[in-house]
Amino acid sequence: MTDLDYNPHKPIDLANRRRRLAFRAWHRGIKELDLIFGNFIEANFDSLSEEDCAWFETLFEEQDHDILGWVTDGENIPEKFTGPMMTRLQALDFMTLKAK
């Protein structure tokens, strides 16, 4: 494989998409989101659908402090992020006290 063959935008299968999402979840930049997202993705890893992955990939493009406020305070959440997945995140019932 040469540098010319590399394409970061090529489609990937669901298993690899989940693995990439898990890595990104544990490496957000602020520890609070690492813990929230990392634990959530691990707890739901096998059940994440293509749509779930797309939702998180879009969410992960937002600013960390905005996301943290949406999850913990539940205020001013953009419409594209409201719904069942945000409600599940806000429950924080998947949390364990471990960090990676």
Image (cartoon, grey):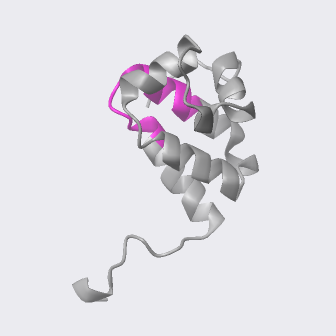
Residue 95 in view: yes
Which stretch is magenta?
25-39
Identify the residue at horizontal 76%, vertical 48% (top origin). 47
Q: Where is residue 67 in the image (x, y as percent from the top left)?
A: 47, 26
The residue lying toward the viewer, choosing from 75 and 93, is 75
Note whether 47 is above or below 44 in the view shown. below
- Residue at the limit of the structure toward the top, as seen here: 73
Residue 92 in view: no
Q: Where is residue 41 in the image (x, y as percent from the top left)?
A: 61, 39
Assign the magenta stretch its main secondary structure.
helix
Q: Specify whether 9 is left or right of 88.
A: left
Q: Specify whether 71 is left or right of 28.
A: right
- The C terminus, quarter of image: top left
Identify the residue at horizontal 41%, vertical 37% (top origin). 62
- Whether the magenta-drawn stretch holds residue 87 is answered as no
Identify the residue at horizontal 70%, vertical 49% (top origin). 48
Q: Where is residue 40 in the image (x, y as percent from the top left)?
A: 62, 32
Identify the residue at horizontal 53%, vertical 73% (top origin). 11
- The N terminus, quarter of image: bottom left
